[in-house]
Amino acid sequence: MQYRSYAKINLFLDVLKKRRDGYHNIETIFQSVGLADDLWFMDDAHISLTCAGHDLDTGASNLVYRAAALLKERTGYSRGARIHLEKRIPVSAGLAGGSGNAAATLIALNKLWDLRLSVSELTPCARDLGADVPYCLRGGTRAAWLRGDCMTPLPEMKGLWFVLIHPSIAVSAGQVYNHPRLEYNREKPFAGRTSAFRKRIRALAADDVAAAVFNRMEAPVFAANSVLVGYKQALLELGCEAAAMSGSGPTLFGVCRSQQQALRVAEGLKQKNVICPCSVAAATPVGVERLA
């Protein structure tokens, strides 16, 4: 079987406070985009993983391997699977590539092993694998809060295209969360959401994307990597409706209303001396898709 796992961006990302378990409460609007990895699954006596496209550890620490092992352990399934991963989503880029791969693995092996579990029944495994994995099981446009694993669907963002800039900069999410330049939102949530979060959701519902896009993590990441400020500005100067960093970075995205506009912006980045790789991707309604 062949599955595709899509990257995600954070149209909106706010950080509230640190939790007792060491994680931070966040408020975010997730969006799946068309940049994707492909995975192949074949029944086998044991779990094994190979990977093309990146120099990744394919052993027990890999999220794909961990997802397979965890699902096998939780369900008591006796056999395994031979898994091959073809990576196109940049690693450690704020795009949840690994989380999406793990979500695809849970969904694919649920089918391959005939476990007949619902997405809701797969979610506890997803939570134990990482904060973004529960979202990646579903994908599309979703508002999320607490660790990012409490979610509600939002209207599908049809017709949006994104220009993604992929700087070759290493960013540690842990360091960003604990950076002195990160100013938490001190507002108290009401019924689980702050008024700032509600305002951004309403803006998105009104198709005012520029008023919805925001990432509180930009301040510490941009302070340490000033080149990203220029990249974001270049996206706006070339006509993107909005631009921001995704997750803890370093990927930046610009919002466009058509593929033609997105391609023009991507071409124009060369004239702005943005020399790192770029992608053009549409908003997608799912996080994982079966291809064969």
Image (tube, helix red, strand yellow):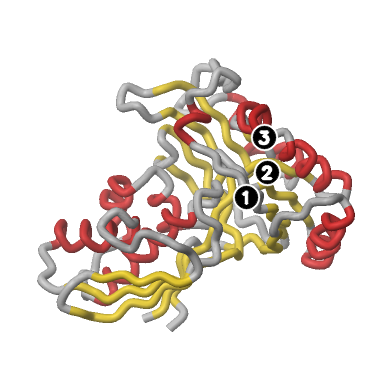
Kindly identify the residue that appears in the image at 45 percent across and 26 percent down. Answer: 191
Kindly identify the residue that appears in the image at 72 percent across and 59 percent down. Answer: 161
Q: Nearer the viewer, mark 2 or mark 3?
A: 3
The label shown at residue 204 is: 2
Determine the image quadrant of residue 156. bottom right
State the residue position of label 3. 225
The label shown at residue 168 is: 1
Query: Looking at the image, is 184 positioned above or below residue 154?
Result: above
- The x and y percentages for residue 256 are 78, 55
SS at badge 2: helix
Which tag, 2 or 1, sits closer to the chain's start?
1
Packing grade of label 3 (10 A; few <14, some 14-19, many >=20) is: some
Query: Looking at the image, is 178 positioned above or below residue 8?
Result: above
- Amino acid tagged 2: Leu
| CB-based contact (under 8 Å), mark 2 and mark 3 | no
How far apart are the two marked residues, 3 and 1, measured between alpha carbons? 11 Å
Depth check: 22 or 13 in front? 22
